[in-house]
Image (spheres, helix red, strand yellow):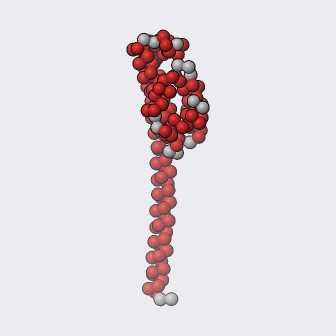
Amino acid sequence: MSAGNNKLRWLEILGLAAVIASVLLLAWEIRQNTQTATAQAMLDLNAMANEVLSAEAQSPQLAAVLVKGEEDLASLSPVEYRQFESHVYTLINTIDAAHGFFTEGILDEEDFSGWREFTCPYLGGSSVNPIWESLKPTWGTEFVAFVDDTCGL
């Protein structure tokens, strides 16, 4: 074997090692990005939910409308109905975001399970369900199918 062939062979080995190192580095970066995306998704979902709950907690008037609407949707004035509907829409939007993160693989089953458990009783509630049904066409088909399949609504 000539010296030129040995150099070529060593260059090939070094090139192969560089490719393997690059692939391993890329896999590590993808894993880090996935973990970051998961953490950011959880932060976003918590911020969305906290914003809704905070509005309710900080406004006795809104809290009163929500209690009244949960007891008897028909008892709400048009303005109160609008407030109740907006609150419901915001919570459904948060559930939809969680579902989207789950279907994209950003949230795993454990992270999404609480959202799934909340969805059916909430959307099936006597005051929320009519609003869900009226707003259903505004949601994506995949989210609607998830609710239909999971909750039978």
Q: Quadrant of the C terminus?
A: top right
Q: Which sits in the foreground, 18 or 60? A: 60
Q: Position of residue 49 (x, y in %)?
A: 47, 28
Against 20, residue 67 (above or below) is above
Question: Picture quarter containing residue 48?
Answer: top left
Q: Does the image show residue 12?
A: yes
Q: Which sits in the foreground, 67 or 147? A: 147
Q: Which sits in the foreground, 4 or 66? A: 66
Say how many tags the image has.
0
The residue sitting at 47% across, 72% down in the picture is 14
The residue sitting at 46% across, 37% down in the picture is 140
Name the outermost residue toward the left: 79
Q: Which sits in the foreground, 2 or 141? A: 141
Q: Position of residue 127 (x, y in %)?
A: 52, 19
Q: Does the image show residue 47?
A: no
Against 19, residue 116 (above or below) is above
Q: Position of residue 124 (x, y in %)?
A: 57, 25
Against 41, residue 8 (above or below) is below
Q: Position of residue 113 (x, y in %)?
A: 59, 35
The residue sitting at 47% across, 67% down in the picture is 19
The residue sitting at 47% across, 26% down in the picture is 134
